[in-house]
Image: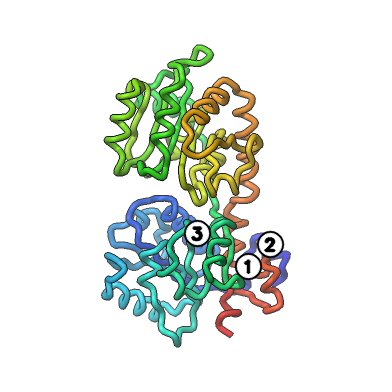
Amino acid sequence: MSEDSLCNGTGSSKAIPSVHIIGGRLLGGAELFYVRLVNALHQRDHPTLAITHPHSLILDALHPAISRTSIPMRGIWDLWSRWQIRQTVERFRPEIVQTYMGRATRLTHLPESKRCIHIARLGGYYNLTGYRHADAWIGNTQGICDYLIRNGLPAQRVFQIGNFILPRQPSSPEMLALRRQQLGVPEHALLIVAVGRLHPVKGFEDLITAFSRLPTALAGRPIYLVIVGDGPLNQQLKSLCSQLGSAERVRWTGWQRDSGLFQELADLIVCPSRHEPLGNVILEAWAWHRPVLATRTLGPAEIAIHQEDAWLVPINDPIALAEALRLLLTDAPLRDHLAANGYQKVHTFYNEQRIVNAYLDPVSYTHLRAHETDSYLVCRLLLE
């Protein structure tokens, strides 16, 4: 098959069986990408096997025709799960075994005589002790890939492939109005929406502090903050809202299976993280055609351009965050400008065809062309 046909999205010239292993139970960023990628490979007729925790929400999100098996993966010392993974892989006979995050990667140790490749996918700057036994590594940002190479992983087996976001279908005006009503938010209010785990690294303290510095209304429109997520700081953050006098204007949704239902309501989506390796929330906001305000942590600073497709502010700086909130909420043309460019970027660089082709088409890696690889990533190169 020619390189042109591959780049046009017709896929690899052969079916590539692959096993995908993940230990998470909820649908966080890594789990949602797992679902999107496995479903996409299945749609292209590549045999796939999903190995998940038996109570994972992933199971309901996968296409029903995808083969699957459940393994407890209770922890990195779960030798029974480690044996089960090995036996399951040997029965399926894949060319590729791809693991997601630490637990699945640490538990996946394939025999030296294997004829398949173990690829570990990383979405963060993790301790690499439990990743070094893999054959190749994927980082979803260039920064993560640089980190892997700086820490001793061979550069020729480290690959940067981003995430993709599926197009979202807009809801009817009636449905949007109903959701606002259910939140107890006036129809004409300006809505700030933030999505994430209520954990110190996500910077929600900074956002709540910044929000409390704003007036209750701008340009005659009341301002509300909607926080979508749950986590260890839940009660502490709610107490902070009360202390700062903004509790009546903050809405807490708890964990949501589809946070996009709230992102779609937003006039502005904020990613206030103190540490963010990629920033899936930003990609999702762009897919909804919504403007983004984010901190200059590693991921957002790599994927976004300040004043072009997002507005970026210093990390852990509530005053700067408040000033940016005030500016963006009072400048609708600026919000429209950021949203339009973000929408264009996500559909150009973070679409399904482009990202899945990168997984299936190593011809796109110029430094591998001399090896005449023709299947999923480095399969033939590493098997030789």
Q: Position of residue 317 (x, y in %)?
A: 48, 34
Which is more toward the observer, 268 or 202? 202
Please tell me which of labels 2 and 3 falls first in the chain. 2
In terms of image quadrants, where is residue 55?
bottom left
User: Is 287 displayed left or right of 340 in the figure?
Assistant: left
- In the rendered image, residue 123, in percent from the top left (x then y), is placed at 48, 57
The three-letter code of the residue at mark 1 reads Asp
Q: Residues within 10 Å of mark 1 (few under 14, many from 20)?
A: many
Q: Is residue 85 left or right of residue 325?
A: left
Circle 3 Cα neighbour tier, 10 Å, few/some/many (<14 / 14–19 / ≥20): many
- At horizontal 44% and vertical 79% (from top left) the residue drawn is 93
Q: Earlier in the sequence, mark 3 or mark 1?
A: 3
On screen, 236 above or below 116?
above
Q: Quadrant of the C terminus?
A: bottom right
Mark 3, secondary structure of its residue: helix
Between the residue at mark 3 and the residue at mark 1, the CA separation in whole angstroms equals 14 Å
Expressed as whole percent of the image width and height from the top left, the position of residue 324 reads 55, 28
> What residue would you read off at disc 1?
361
Q: Residue furthest top?
A: 220
The label on residue 7 is 2
> Gap between marks 1 and 2, in whole Å?
8 Å
Q: Residue furthest bottom?
A: 113
Q: Residue at label 3?
A: 37
Residue 199 at x, y percent in the picture: 36, 44
Q: Give the CA distance from mark 2 to mark 3.
A: 17 Å
